[in-house]
Image: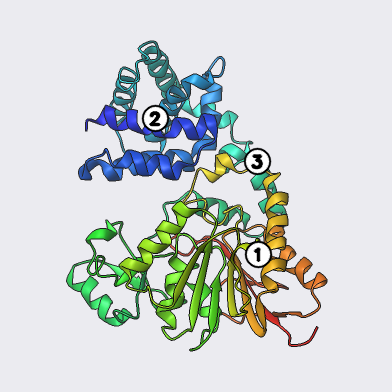
Amino acid sequence: MSADNIRVLAARTLAPVIAKGQSLTPLFDAAIEKVSERDKGLFQTLCFGTLRQYHQLSAITERLLDKPLRNKDADIQALVLLGLYQLIHLRTPDHAAISETVSACKPLRKLWAGKLVNGLLRNFLRNRDEIEAQLQNSDAYQYSHPAWFIGKLKKAWPDTYIQTLHANNQQPPVCLRVNQQQCTRENYAKLLENAGISFDLLETAPNGVRLQTQVDVRTLPGFDDGWFSVQDEAAQLSAELLDLKPGQRVLDACAAPGGKSCHILEKEAKIRELVCIEQESARMERVEQNLLRLQLGQNVTLKVSDANDLNNWWDGQVFDRILLDAPCSATGVIRRHPDIKLLRRPDDLAKLGALQLQLLAQLWQVLAPGGLLVYATCSVLPEENERIVQAFLQQTANAEHLAIEAPWGVARPIGRQLFPQLNGHDGFYYARLYKEACA
């Protein structure tokens, strides 16, 4: 695929995200199948990098345009953003970035746009210092995040919010979780060494490995045999916090795509049963695929249902352990899903908070006395994390908060908060709740 066609495909992939608020993941997954192995890295860099820097690039575009482009020309808007991204953030020579971006207008069947795109990009280069100086006082430009999110983050975490914003704009590392039912981390580390792949052993996750370079994980030793999964360091902490033991009945209440479910089975192969709940059948298929590849299908029950609807899925038998990885704003994993910057809205938080509190209340009913529930989100906002758990504790007489003593994250009055780190873990929140025997 030629350089300009890569940009055409990137523009077509980004346009529905920009104009219609569609999720990047299904669009990207469908598009990258059309890209040669040689060009997949560039295509991913263009799509994800442009969205990570969307607010910066959009602020510049607004300065360059006399009037906004129409919604039906979102592909041309995406092209302009792609061109600016190359000029500012990549090593693409200026003339090549402009030429290839302009050439992409023809396959999009918008010849009129070639002159516009050429003029905008050249105007930026001529007036770059002036444009950037004019935008210096804009937080959205400076940090390339929506202003509402910057405001919330600054209010909640005034001492660390800038580090979080910077981390969100970087490419995240790739972490592996070695399947201890198939291979020890030490033995797998030797396989990586023999393959010439640089890595670090994760200190906080006993089966975790962080790769030092980006690779196609499908080419790593043991992928087809289920020797490892791709899972961030922060997410690998969930199974550790469950205090799993043989004979327990365990619930993974929002299971897709199945990484945490698989980790539960890897960590304790002798649990009595793991029940996985997922609302969407297509996402449950991902759980099944992961279980199959990792050879972990025993003692597992999969149920497609809304976890809140106990009458639809619960069989009346209580659980010793529950993992509630609750639906959330995903503001701790923005660098992995940069479309969150465009798709999330401030009023989403109240709706998500109500859902999170409802899930806690419903699932508490199916937890055995003396049982443990781990509440988790990939959010960095207190209104989805400690405030939700605090509200639940205030309305639930037999719920007790158990402090997490750990070397990772920041201890909060309730639970523990992790923030995304450069070359480190994602943003996450955990709280452990114990169900007392008597109300």
Residue at image position (45%, 60%) is: 257
- The residue at which mark 1 appears reads as 311
Mark 1 crowdedness (10 Å alpha carbons): few <14, some 14-19, many ≥20: few
Q: Name the residue type under label 1.
A: Asn
| Helix, strand or loop for disc 3 | helix
Q: Earlier in the sequence, mark 2 or mark 1?
A: 2
Q: Is residue 189 above or below residue 114?
A: below
Q: CA distance from mark 1 to mark 3?
A: 42 Å
Q: CA distance from mark 2 to mark 1?
A: 43 Å
* 72 sits left or right of 391 in the view: left
- The residue at which mark 2 appears reads as 12
For discs 1 and 3, the disc positioned in front in the rendered view: 1
Q: Is residue 111 above or below residue 295?
A: above
Q: Name the residue type under label 2.
A: Arg
Residue at image position (45%, 42%) is: 24
Residue at image position (72%, 67%) is: 361
Q: Name the residue type under label 3.
A: Ala
Q: Is residue 127 above or below residue 283?
A: above
For discs 2 and 1, the disc positioned in front in the rendered view: 1
